[in-house]
Image (tube, grey):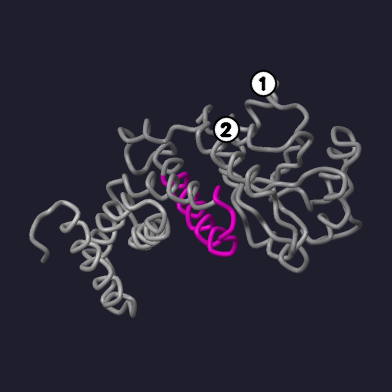
Amino acid sequence: MRDYGEAVLHSVPPRGVLLLSSDEVIGSVRYLQQVEGVRPDVYVLPIGIVALPWFRTVAARHMPDLVLPPGPFTFRQFLDLNLQRRPVVVCNRTPWLRTLEEAYAPWLLGLVEQVLPRGQEPPAGQWVRDNEASFAAFAPARTAAFPPSSWEHALATGYWKQYERYGLALVRRAAARRDDPLLPEATIRALETLAARPAVAPVVLRNLGVAYQFRARTEPDALEPMVRHWRRYLALAPADDPDLPNIRTLVEDAERTLAGRRGGPRP
């Protein structure tokens, strides 16, 4: 729990505002900040109380440059007044945050999400480095011995869901920016991490095969991992996937090519 709270705090940019919900993150982050003095530069705002009238007194005393809109307010209104002053990140979204989508967009930042104006993208290289650093700061593999009803098990489950979101976000960003060599490599690193887990989503294997397919255009050795991951995908894929025949054909063609390179009989 301590490791998780520390990883969340260290994922926040300097002088950031962290809006968070759920007991495990509120408790661990509050303990670290209030008792151990970790990241005093970060404003921590539990989502459930930030819009309550009595919180204004607390904010005025401890967060002097934070601006709270008058009366009941939306997250969009909060962002309009504060995003130019401090970076704003979110850990565990709630329905109250939906209004951000009117003018802003959340970008994955490892265990948290950073809110940016719609249409603005973080630089790809820094975005990858920040995400990888955030995920590396927490080691959920150590929670394997905890029962499913434990907080530790819940943290591990949430971690891997977030990591999968990151991997698929890399897929989309790499597809949109094919001229950036950093993104395909980062995509393969992330999806390989997910593919090594016992329970892997078929979409991960599918996209990992695609990533190796693109790499195989310049690196012939990429055909073998492409075939391996697509074979796993074909065993798990939903029967109504319209691309199944195409992937089967690509796998068979690649296997003939690999057999020819090895000097063996071509299937």
Q: Position of residue 209 (x, y in %)?
A: 35, 59
- Dot placed on the residue nearer the N-terminal end, 2 or 1: 2
Q: Is residue 106 left or right of residue 131?
A: right
Toward which corner of the image does residue 10 lie, by quadrant? top right
Question: Residues under labels 2 and 1: Cα distance?
Answer: 16 Å
Q: Secondary structure at mark 2?
A: helix
Return the residue at label 2.
7
In this view, the residue in front, 264 or 75, is 264
Magenta highlight: main SS: helix
In this view, the residue in front, 245 or 222, is 222
Toward which corner of the image does residue 111 lie, by quadrant? top right
In this view, the residue in front, 215 or 17, is 215
Quadrant where the image shows the C terminus: bottom left
Residue 35 is marked as 1
Please report the residue visible at 31 percent of the width from the left and 49 percent of the height from the top. Answer: 221
Please report the residue visible at 63 percent of the width from the left and 37 percent of the height from the top. Answer: 11
Q: Position of residue 116 (x, y in %)?
A: 74, 55
